[in-house]
Image (tube, rainbow, N blue to C red):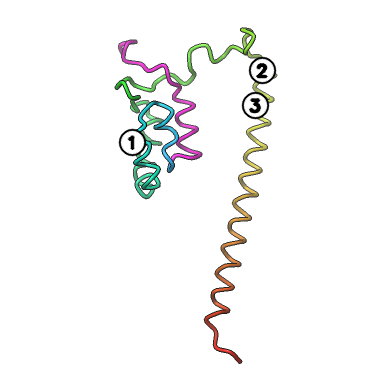
């Protein structure tokens, strides 16, 4: 593969954005595809079909940025260095992993709350449809 055909954007970041908030086109905004990002935002990822296609394409390494370059590298150049120029250590990764685990727990709790609210709304609607005693 020609190095000039490889984007400086991270496939890992694009995949994370696509997996987490892909129906809103976040991964397309990240790679500079503003127009198609807005289209995904308005259609909620093409009702999910476009979104799933993009997740598969990114994971396979065939996704392209706004310049037509492949989003191939898992990390952006220089992303393994801290703000002070030092290389990240395994301890940094442990901290990041614990933060990700915390985010997963928060997302799980949020999903449970949304599910609960949906059941409450459905229950109140079914109660409204019943004739008075």
Front: mark 1 or 3: 1
Residue found 63% across the figure and 33% down from its top: 100
Residue 117, quarter of picture: bottom right
- Which residue is farthest top? 85
Residue found 37% across the figure and 36% down from its top: 37
Q: Which residue is mark 1?
A: 36
Front: mark 1 or 2: 1
Mark seen at residue 90: 2
Q: Earlier in the sequence, mark 3 or mark 2?
A: 2
Mark seen at residue 96: 3
Q: Residues within 10 Å of mark 1 (few under 14, many from 20)?
A: some
Find the distance from the CA under tag 3 to the CA under tag 2: 10 Å
Q: Secondary structure at mark 1?
A: helix
Q: Secondary structure at mark 2?
A: helix
* Relative height, residue 132 to residue 105 (above, below): below
Percent across and percent down for residue 6 are 35, 16
- Magenta span: predominant SS is helix
Find the distance from the CA under tag 1 to the CA under tag 2: 37 Å
Residue 130, quarter of picture: bottom right
- Chain part drawn in magenta: 1-22
* Relative height, residue 61 to residue 129 (above, below): above
| Magenta-colored stretch includes residue 91 | no
Find the distance from the CA under tag 1 to the CA under tag 3: 31 Å
* Relative height, residue 78 to residue 121 (above, below): above
Residue found 32% across the figure and 11% down from its top: 4
| Magenta-colored stretch includes residue 5 | yes
């Amino acid at each position: 593969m020609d190095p000039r055909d490889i984007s400086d954007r991270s496939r890992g970041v694009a995949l994370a954005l696509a997996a987490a908030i892909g129906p809103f086109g976040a991964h397309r905004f990240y790679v500079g595809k503003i127009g198609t990002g807005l289209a995904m935002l308005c259609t909620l990822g093409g009702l999910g079909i476009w979104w799933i296609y993009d997740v598969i394409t990114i994971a396979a390494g065939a996704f392209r940025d706004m310049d037509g370059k492949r989003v191939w590298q898992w990390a952006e150049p220089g992303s393994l260095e801290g703000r002070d120029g030092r290389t990240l250590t395994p301890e940094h990764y442990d901290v990041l992993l614990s933060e990700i685990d915390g985010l997963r727990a928060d997302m799980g709790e949020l999903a449970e709350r949304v599910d609960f609210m949906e059941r409450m709304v459905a229950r109140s609607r079914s109660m409204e449809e019943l004739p008075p005693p």
